[in-house]
Amino acid sequence: MIPKLCRFLGMAPVPVDWKGIDELFPLLEKLRADGAVIMLKWDGEHGSGGDQGPYTALITGRVLSGEFFRADRASIEEALAEVIVAYASARWGFTPQTESKK
């Protein structure tokens, strides 16, 4: 979904098999420039077993008028992808079927 979002925004391509956060810095910077606050948490008190996972991504900020997007997942990539796509859908009109920004 992230590679498709980058195409939608006219940004440099991100590999389909991206790992970590380095590939996402331009996209995260775009969120920040839009007024969003992005927080990441690596939680050693939560395992990847029975709970929702040790990695949390959260996007909030005044630009969302009290709303926020949060995901607790087994990997940082899953958590980031979920909240970034939710934000892009709410703020920029992105849908998985969208190919380019209008």
Image: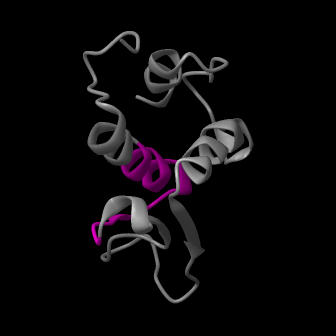
Q: Residue at x 32, y 77 (%)?
A: 51
Nearer-the-camera pick, 17 or 13? 13
Q: Position of residue 79 (x, y in %)?
A: 44, 56
Q: Is residue 58 above or below residue 8?
A: below
* Membership of 80 in magenta stretch: yes
Let me know if residue 86 appears in the view. Answer: yes
Query: What residue appears at the point 41 percent right and 70 percent down from the top-left corner?
Result: 53
* Stretch of the chain drawn in magenta: 66-84
Horizontal and vertical percent position of residue 64: 34, 60
Q: Residue 19, located in which quarter of the rendered image?
A: top right
Q: Does the magenta portion include 73? A: yes
Residue furthest bottom as drawn: 45
Percent from the top left, x then y, of residue 66? 29, 72
Residue 54 in the image: state x and y as whole percent: 49, 73
On the question of residue 73 being in view, the answer is no
Q: Is residue 22 left or right of residue 71?
A: right
Of 91 and 87, the residue lying toward us: 91
